[in-house]
Amino acid sequence: MRIPVGLRAEGAPAERRPPGEPAGRGPAAWSPRRRGAAALGAGALPALAFPEPSLWWFAWAALVPWMLLLRSAPTGRRAMVEGWLGGIGFMVAVHHWLLPSLHVFLAVIAALLGLLWAPWGRLVRHMTAGAPSGGRALAALVVVPSGWLMIELVRSWEGLGGPWGLLGASQWEVTPALRLASVGGVWLVSLLVVAVNTALALLVAVRAARRAALAGVLVCAVAAACAWAWAPQPRESGRLRIALVQPGVLGGADGAERRFDRGEELTRELAGRGAPPDLVVWGESSVGADLGLRPDLADRLGALARGTGAPVLVNVDARSGGASGPRGIYKSSVLVGPDGPTGDRYDKMRLVPFGEYVPARSLLGWATSVGRAAGEDRLRGTAPVVMTLPGGERIGPLVCFESAFPDMSRHLVREGAGLLVAQSATSSFQDSWAPEQHASLAALRAAESGRPMVHATLTGVSAVYGAHGQRIGAPLGTDTSAAAVYDVPRAEGTTLYVRLGDWPVYGALGVLAVFAAAGAVRLIRRPAPGPAGRSARTARASAGRPGR
């Protein structure tokens, strides 16, 4: 008995149904409405692998239900629809904490970005439907993850929301995965996770492909083991004492002043805690006025630097004449020493769409009426900055959203930064998954770059990670108002990711190019259909007496 033609990939051989299996069993027999609902739910499943649930192990199988559904799609067009619906489910689930800010606009964004998964849905069906041969199954383990990585690459563009919720980022607390990140960044981890999901889907659904799927899993395991054994790793070289100041939730009309007062109070308490720190870090928007226009605030910060014996890195969120351009609202990391601002200033370069500016405001400005979109666009900086501390240590500041971008931290390390510092504020999403998700990104950036990284926030979660991505000390949670000092190991040496950059992305592009070229060659070589021949006549079938 043959499987219906609609369940086979283009050009794939028919798969024999096991004896006794009913023709209508499984997702292939579901109604389109039921399949659509299943696609939405299956696409949302990977969100459980990210903080706060942090079921990191689930990521290695979370895509299997979605892939099995796509594999059984009756047509390639239907697979594209279910890829799109699954993409919507994924985007809403991973970014659901944006709902209070974006309201209905979140659904619009998810529907638009979900289109990125439509071609991937057809690709999954093409590579896995029917009874793929061993060669096709092995190819699926490379092609399907490459297609997924292209989705992550495209949606990582700042204007589309940035690289939040990359599948590889779910492995931020898994030491072997962090070692892989040092080789190929979060991109390599995403490739491996999707490859294992593809292998599991084949193991479950295609008996003939199980040997190839197991071989693929073995190759993934060997590659991870080789990275663990031979990838160059940073070497510890001395220690740094870094203090993080987290004032906590302080709202109201005078929230900026109260936040500054509380940060000042907590910083003063550091003076009596043993050896002075090398750096004190405040969170994003910790200063609500231009220090050039408020010399009283600059003097108070200078006094804190003298009292603690360490410079203070604050973040100014105010209208000012930017170091990068015209007067406007910037978010700027400013280093303050005993005599006031040292002149080291970094203006945030990559802004949060809708949160800090509204793309195409003339068309989308209505978003400010249905959510907490930016009423006025922030201005952006033009270049990264590496600052030098009094002891000679060089730091690379990032502001909030920028810690999600692997290329930014890599660039700072290549420019000589020995410590990465992210200043953040997630108070608008205090009781959501966002604070934990944001803090976890620093672990990946540390592992990729081979440099320790601190993530300092106004309201939590503040955390510190070593050069291997390992957590140092206890984080400051969202219910904490405190200052904490961390003993951070310095690091020397260069990771392969810092040297080679985003090579997994280029590799995935190459794979898809070869796949497309092979498909084009097969199409060209396919023989054209010939003219229909005359039917043969028999004694029982003639022009005057057609056969029955």
Image (spheres, rainbow, N blue to C red):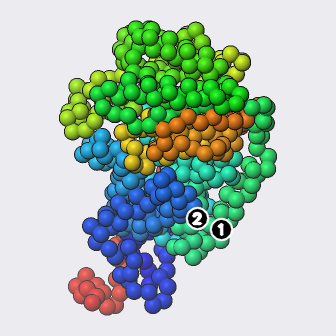
From this view, report whether residue 537 is shown above or below residue 316: below
Nearest the camera: 163 or 461?
461
Q: In the picture, residue 447 is in which quadrant?
A: top right
Lateral position of residue 170 relative to residue 1, left or right: right
- Point 34% across, 44% down: residue: 98
- What residue is shown at x 35% (from left), y 29% (from top)? 255
Q: In the rendered image of this protein, does residue 130 appear above or below residue 81? A: below
Pointer 2 or 1: first along the chain: 2
Q: The N terminus is located in which quarter? A: bottom left
Amino acid at circle 1: Leu
Q: Mark 2: few, some, or many residues within 10 Å (few <14, many ≥20)?
A: many
Q: What percent of the width, then of the height, locates residue 158?
A: 43, 33
Residue 439 can be seen, yes or no: no
Query: Camera-side residue: 248 or 164?
Result: 248
| Mark 2 → mark 1, Cα distance in angstroms | 7 Å
Residue sitting at x 71%, y 28%: 275
Can residue 22 be seen?
yes
Element assignment for label 1 = helix
Q: Are marks 2 and 1 in contact (CB under 8 Å)?
A: yes
> Which residue is painted at 41% across and 14% down in the image?
290
At which x and y percent is residue 503?
63, 38
Q: At which x and y percent is residue 517?
A: 53, 47
Q: Is residue 305 above or below residue 92?
A: above
Which label number is shown at residue 199? 2
Query: In the rendering, which numbered label is found on residue 527?
Result: none
Comparing 451 with 116, the one in front is 451
Residue located beneath label 1 in the image: 214
Q: Residue furthest front?
A: 272
